[in-house]
Amino acid sequence: MNKRSNALVFAVLIGLIIVAIGLGFLIGLDNPIPWILIAVLFLIPIAYKKYFKNDAIIWKEEYSVGIQSLDDDHKRLIYLLNQFKTAYEYDTSAEFERQALGQLVEYTRFHFSREEDMMQEAGYDDFEEHKKQHERMIAQVEEFVGLYNREGHDSLNEVSTYLTNWLINHINGTDKQYTEVMQQHGIK
Ligand SMILES: [Fe+2]
Ligand SMILES: [Fe+2]
């Protein structure tokens, strides 16, 4: 079941409990069942949060590469990634799903290009290897987009996992290696 179905099941359950409480009170206020159901009603949101926890990615200070414009780009990428994950996990419309994936890929290209220009400007030694990582990622994402065009929604689980792991590992690992050189060149 996707998250939208889970939410629907919980909403139906809450509705049924409310109806049962009403019917229970019609029998009499000394009937214990509606009081028990009221307690259950309060426990449902807690159970929902526990079992279907939000797995949105949150930007942390430790992800900072020390360059404000690139941190802003990375925050935007994480925002777009979360938007895509929501579109996929809640099995929204194909249009929203495609749009969210498209925006993420488009902004990734824009960010890579900006980051590469800044690395070159700073004369960063590992520029070529870093650029190759970007190119490999874009090639992989293009394959995923092709797969999505052929197979639709079900192919997106792999895409979501790949993008989440790749982006966080890249930002938190490879990207951080240029910080010192860029800062030495006064890049902000
Ligand atoms: Fe980056
Ligand atoms: Fe990068």
Image (cartoon, helix red, strand yellow):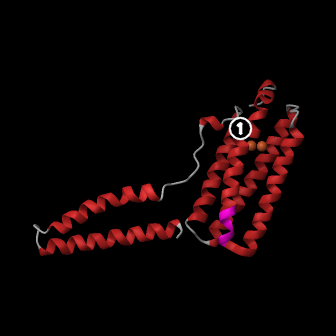
Foreground pick, 17 / 95: 17
| Left or right of residue 61: residue 177 | right
- Looking at the picture, how far across and down is residue 163, in whole percent? 70, 55
Quadrant containing the C terminus is top right
59 above or below 145?
above
63 above or below 144?
above
Q: Residue at x 37, y 55 (%)?
A: 46
Examine the structure image and report whether residue 156 is included in the region drawn in magenta: yes
Looking at the magenta stretch, what is its main secondary structure?
helix
9 above or below 169?
below
In which image quadrant can residue 41 be found? Answer: bottom left
Q: Which residue is drawn at 57% across and 60% down?
A: 86
> Which quarter holds ligand 2?
top right
Residue, disc 1: 69
In which image quadrant can residue 47 be found? Answer: bottom left
- Looking at the picture, how far across and down is residue 43, in whole percent? 32, 58
Chain part drawn in magenta:
153-158
Q: Which residue is drawn at 61% across and 59% down?
A: 85
Q: Three-letter amino acid code at disc 1?
A: Ser
